[in-house]
Amino acid sequence: MSDFSGLSRRRFIATAGAASGAVLLKGCFGNPPSPANLSPRAEAMTLSPATTPEVSNIKLGYIAIAESAPLIIAREKGFFDRYGMTGVDVSKQASWGAARDNIEIGSEGGGIDGGQWQMPMPHLISEGLITKGSRKIPMVLLAQLSTQGNGIAIATKHEGKGFGLDIGKSGAGDYIKQMSQNGTPFKAAYTFPKVNQDFWIRYWLAAGGVDPNKDLNLIAVPAAQTVANMRTGSMDGFSTGDPWPYRIIKDRRKIGFMAALTAQMWPAHPEEYLALRRDWIEKHPIATKAILKAVMEAQQWCDDPKNREEMVRILATRKYFNVPTDFLRGPYEGHYIMGDSKPEVKDPNLGIKYWKDIRGSVSYPYKSHDLWFLTESVRWGFLPEGVLGESKRIIDTVSGEKYWREAAQEIGIPAADIPQSTSRGLEKFFDGVEFNPENPKAYLDSLKIKSIKA
Ligand code: CA
């Protein structure tokens, strides 16, 4: 009897070992991991009447890219529940256009109450500039979700042409212009017009002497379709964010390579933001702060290297990004395989950050960054020049700085981590250009390539 049970036990151990081995192998060969073996969720706070949210549910949209991690982590690790928001629905959006349409109808109409946005989408939605029938949907910007983690990918067929950070010096800028003169213009994509990804590729092109309005075709195409088109050779470039760069580089079919990272173009640049509908916030100010507190905790959790493996495992699952964990590990360590015989980038300061970066707070929604997005919109004629005269009103109306500061104080964020000013001050780009938020016109005057409209 004892022999028999001993044998069973050995058999059981052998079988269990083989099973876990199989899981590991699956992970290595590119299947998304299962969310097993996670550390415990955050414990609930004892809430007073002043901190008990008016409602416990909200519907937040996200796009399956690295910027959304604080929302996903706040949900999965129990940070939302901790502050009484036990019914937060973190809802995957099919595209930026879908997110825009869903905010317009709100959760009552089957849409969303807020979520993750490229900039300046909250301002454009508030002003009724990208909504159906130009309807104004006032929004409030509560926090920046992340910095860095975006870049410019180029199709494999353009290897060896000097595509890097500075295409003016390397000859790749002339190569793009030559393609246009030959009647086969370079074709590049972003996922939604007049926001971050469009700005990043325009800045990079123009710094290299290429006019994005004249010297190539720049168009809005969904990410998956762009990558498929790069593979077949009908798309030449893509302004994109993690984990797409790894999807492109590591694909066996050699889809493309990375020319530049946004972290190299503008270290610690503003990226994507958390914003909610103003009508929701006005009805639920305590719940608004509860959401912010949870997101702030999640941002700190995400930046802590000891949580990295767990974070990567959660994000990589089929439910969220549906990628191998390998595709996410690199970007968080600032490790990028660039391809095209370029050296690998290995610098933790160039990785994705959620809470703190080399300039201080990532999470704080600086008005000076809203102003850069509006100024860049004027640079490319997306908004008329007169918007600069109105920028204070537009930015003040959308800013949720007040909520950020109160939430930070209520959860005991150290004073040193709460910015003193609403301006981060002077911003410096890789090509030597500077943006002084005190004088956006001087920035516009300093730029050679632009298409300002009166
Ligand atoms: Ca982005």
Image: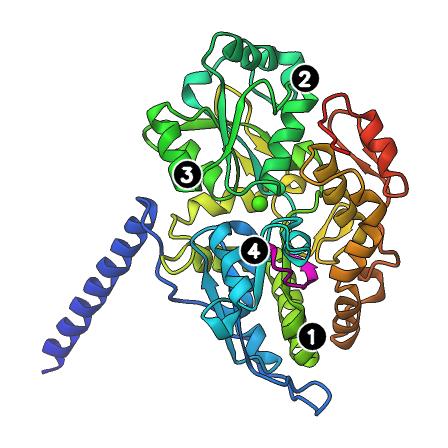
What residue lies at 22% left-to-right and 58% top-to-bottom?
A: 18
Q: Quadrant of residue 47?
A: bottom right
Q: Nearer the viewer, residue 269 or 97?
A: 97
Q: CA distance from mark 2 to mark 1?
A: 45 Å
Q: Which sits earlier in the primary sequence, circle 3 or circle 2?
A: 2
Mark 4 or mark 3, which is nearer the start of the sequence?
A: 4
Q: What span is colored magenta in the figure? A: 133-145
Question: CA separation, marks 4 and 1?
Answer: 32 Å
**Quadrant of ligand 1 in image:** top right
138 sits left or right of 325 in the view? right
Q: In the picture shown, does residue 390 fall above or below 287?
A: above
Q: Secondary structure at mark 2?
A: loop
Q: Is residue 371 magenta?
A: no
Tell me residue 420's x, y (percent).
88, 59
Query: Which mark is in front, 3 or 4?
Result: 4
Residue under circle 3?
Answer: 247
Residue 136 magenta-drawn?
yes
Mark 2 crowd level (few <14, some 14–19, many ≥20, 10 Å Cα): some
Q: Is residue 430 above or below residue 98?
A: above
Which residue in the protein does label 4 denote?
Answer: 133
Q: Which mark is residue 289?
A: 1
